[in-house]
Image (spheres, rainbow, N blue to C red):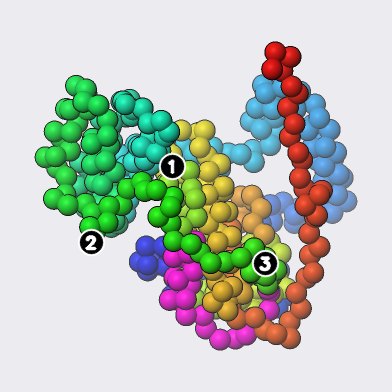
Amino acid sequence: MCACITNRPISLHLPDAYSPQPHADVRVRHPSLTLLRKFIPRKLRAIAKRFAVRFSRHGARWFSWNSFLASLYYLVVNRSFCREQRAVLAGRADYWRSETGTYRETSVQLRRNIHRIEKGLIMKPRRAIFALRYIAETIDAFEAAMASPLEEPDEIRWATDVLDRYFESVEPFPEASEQRQRFDRIRLSDGSRDGQAVAPFPYADIVPHGIGHEQLLALFRHRKSVRWFERRPVPFEDIKKAVDGARLAPSSCNRQPYWFYITTDPSTAQKLASCAMGTAGYVHNIQSLIVLVGDLSSFFSERDRHLIYIDGALAAMQLMLALDTLGISTCNINWPDIGERERRLSGLLGLSPYLRPIMLIAAGYADHTGGVPFSQKKSSDLLIRRVVLPARPDA
């Protein structure tokens, strides 16, 4: 089966039965490149390749002198960022389309602004008036979400409780009073659950985790990149349990701009994994696969385009650790930015232009006879760069 985080099945665009061979060539070439290879002599191709490598090496030095030359290089010489540029623009277009129309699973603008209000509520000292610039658009988003119920009812409860706390906390001023009246007209009768408000609370109320540093290190050391799995199914419900842990990872303004596309069918997992590089030797052995997909429609501006990778990586690490506690081993698969491979995977998953694959994660029960790379890690002494600012003369 294949599903994303919403637990709603999706249809994959898969051809007939697929069974990759242990050492099958899974490289992806554009048809025009394959045609050119037939007519251009091998020696001439080798000369052209050497020239391209040399030009790329020297061009990086020449065109990196300033921003204009760098932009010119990637406009004329190297078009590697074209797909990212299109994805960012498509994401912005979908963001504004969703904010002016009917919501689907979630309201990104509502999540972002409610999180901003939460941060204002916990400030020390708290300002008497805050969120003035965006409280009206927050109530607009809240009203739109109420008009087209979201698939996440907890999102509405959270927004209701936080807005309740906000209007109780700020000093009365004309803009707030006007928005308070709107909020009271459209709000839920009671946003809280079981008398417990889902709004900012004291740190002292957090339940202790009971996990020591050595226990945590033991989990870190136990999780390895496993490429050899037993041929037995991984229960979808176990992967869903791990996603329940991954979704608790921090993200910018609580937007969580990613989806988990999951398949527990070995043939589907192998078909999808063959789109990546470095899987040719073991792709036939993959039992389940998780494709972490970044959603650029979560952002209104280009400035946030890297957050799908930052937030996605935070969630992915928690996902792999959570799976390890359930006895399920994982291997995060190399996913370089190569156009032909991304187009192939996006086509199989039916992804919109603003949805970009971030990472593939193979999952399964480890074959205890299989090898695991040692992967010597850099020492903390090497990785740490202590920051010491020079003392100010007037200090």
Which one is in front in this view, the residue at disc 3 or the one at disc 1? 3
Earlier sequence position, callout 3 versus callout 2: 2
Which residue, given by chain and number where applicable, does mark 2 sit on? 194
Identify which residue, 16 or 181, lies in the foreground.
181
Which one is in front in this view, the residue at disc 1 or the one at disc 2? 2
The amino acid type, in three-letter code, at marker 3 is Glu
Tell me which corner region of the image, top left, top right, bottom left or bottom right, holds residue 164: top left
156 up-or-down from 350: above or below: above
Which residue, given by chain and number where applicable, does mark 3 sit on? 214
The amino acid type, in three-letter code, at marker 1 is Cys
Residue beneath the point at 70% across and 33% down:
77
> Looking at the picture, how far across and down is residue 155, in whole percent?
30, 52
Q: Residue 301 lies in magenta, yes or no?
A: no
Residue beneath the point at 53% across and 43% down:
307
220 up-or-down from 390: above or below: below
> Looking at the picture, how far across and down is residue 134, in whole percent?
32, 29
Earlier sequence position, callout 3 versus callout 1: 3
Which secondary structure, mark 2?
Answer: loop
The Cα atoms of the two marked residues, 1 and 2, are separated by 26 Å
Q: Residue 244 lies in magenta, yes or no?
A: yes
